[in-house]
Image: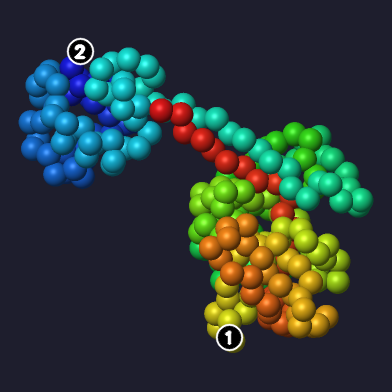
Amino acid sequence: MGSTERMREYLDYKGITKYKFCNDLGFSNKFLDNSSNMGTDKACKILHHYPDINSEWLLTGNGPMIKEENTSVVIMNNDRRTVDSIHINQEIPLYDLEAVAGLRELFNSGEPQRVLDTIKIPNLPKCDGAISVTGDSMYPLLKSGDIVLYKETEFENIFFGEMYLLSVKLNDWEEYITVKYVQKSDQGVEYVKLVSQNSHHQPKDIHISKISALALIKASIRINTMM
């Protein structure tokens, strides 16, 4: 079996029509009609467009068709004296943050929000929700695409030095959503210092009135794709 035949097998598995495949990648409609191996340039284009395909399987037929994934879960902030009770079973909604105006709306709205998926992980502290992380400010502890699980809180309950998901008001209509360590500021009790894990991002002191929403990070999830 050649690589074009394996590609047909993948399209059948995914329910993708040959027309859509050729149209999306700019290939001729007869591309999949032969049984020979495709060229390297075509294979690279296909692997870029369909990142779940195992490249070794496509090119040689060895290994599984779909890349294998493994998931790592890290419990955050679990070494402080006040330890939350562990929930044996809970369903945590993974929210689409881009579908709402911001964290404050997500936290305060009594209306159902856009839920992308439900996360079920046993033996975790109580969590109110989860979102995907963007940016590299907390790298390598967190990287873009990781999922953080959070518990909503208020500023008066803050534990300095721990990691939080927070919304910072830039003006009356714009806010900055980020994950940072929150530390005490040298500028006084009305300020906090936001600190990144990534040393390339400088700490920033902000007035506490600028924080419109706050949640303690309870755990993170990273999905690692195995080639």
Count of numbered circles on the image: 2
Pick whichever of labels 1 and 2 is earlier in the sequence: 2
Q: Is residue 41 visible?
A: yes
How was the colour assigned to the protein in this rendering? rainbow
Residue 2 appears in which quarter of the rendering? Answer: top left
* Category of crowding for the residue at label 1, using alpha-carbon neighbours closer than 10 angstroms: few (below 14), some (14–19), many (at least 20): few
- Name the secondary structure under disc 1: loop
Q: Amino acid at mark 1?
A: Asn
Q: Which mark is residue 171?
A: 1
* Category of crowding for the residue at label 2, using alpha-carbon neighbours closer than 10 angstroms: few (below 14), some (14–19), many (at least 20): few
Residues 18 and 131: in front is 131
Coordinates of residue 194 in the picture (x, y in percent)? 68, 69
Q: Which quarter of the image is occupied by the N terminus?
A: top left
Coordinates of residue 212 in the picture (x, y in percent)? 69, 75
Q: Give above or below for 65 relative to 44.
A: above
Give the CA separation, mark 1 to mark 2. 60 Å
Residues 114 and 121: in front is 121
Coordinates of residue 214 in the picture (x, y in percent)? 72, 67
Q: Amino acid at mark 2?
A: Met
Which residue, as the protein is rendered here, is positioned at the far right? Answer: 81
Direction from residue 70 to residue 123 in the image, left or right:
right
Q: Give above or below for 21 relative to 92.
A: above
Residue 29 appears in which quarter of the rendering? Answer: top left
Q: Is residue 111 visible?
A: no
Direction from residue 21 to residue 218 in the image, left or right:
right
Give the residue at x 70% y 46%. 219
Q: Give above or below for 43 relative to 140.
A: above
Q: Are marks 1 and 2 in contact (CB under 8 Å)?
A: no
Residue at the spot of label 2 = 1
Give the residue at x 76% y 58%. 162
Give the residue at x 88% y 44%. 85
